[in-house]
Image (cartoon, rainbow, N blue to C red):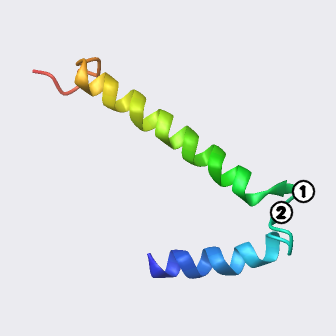
Amino acid sequence: MILLCCAASLVGSNFIDDDGRVFGIKVALIVDAVMLAMGIWFLIRWLREKHGVHSCKSCQ
């Protein structure tokens, strides 16, 4: 985890400019979009597990 954070810091400093933009897009918008997508993905997985709509490859 520590190595991943160090690598992200080194790489991020090369791509993120002083205004907090990556390729002209604010980093905060990118992070918000990723967090929203992850939240929706986890919610869908949780609903599928709760309602029993999952793959039965391991069912006997």
Residue toward you, 56 or 31 = 31
Would you place residue 30 above or below residue 51 in this image? below
Q: Residue 11: where, in percent of width, then height? A: 71, 75
Residue drawn at the location 74% of the way across and 59% of the way down: 27
Examine the image and state in which quarter residue 51 appears: top left
Q: Amino acid at mark 1?
A: Gly
Local packing at callout 2 (Cα closer than 10 Å; few below 14, some 14-19, many 20+) is some
Examine the image and state in which quarter residue 49 appears: top left
Local packing at callout 1 (Cα closer than 10 Å; few below 14, some 14-19, many 20+) is few
Would you place residue 36 above or below residue 6 in this image? above
Quadrant, the C terminus: top left
Residue corresponding to mark 2: 21
Q: Is residue 22 left or right of residue 41?
A: right
Would you place residue 42 above or below residue 57 in this image? below
Residue corresponding to mark 1: 24
Examine the image and state in which quarter residue 20 appears: bottom right
Cβ atoms at labels 1 and 2 below 8 Å apart: yes
Residue 49 numbered mark, or none: none
Q: Residue 24: where, in percent of width, then height? A: 90, 56
Quadrant, the N terminus: bottom left
Q: Residue 14: where, in percent of width, then height? A: 80, 76
Q: Secondary structure at mark 1?
A: loop
Q: Residue 48: where, in percent of width, then height? A: 32, 23
Residue toward you, 43 or 56 = 43
Q: Whole-Å distance between the Cαs marked 1 and 2? A: 5 Å
Q: Amino acid at mark 2?
A: Arg
Residue drawn at the location 80% of the way across and 70% of the way down: 16
Q: Is residue 48 left or right of residue 1?
A: left
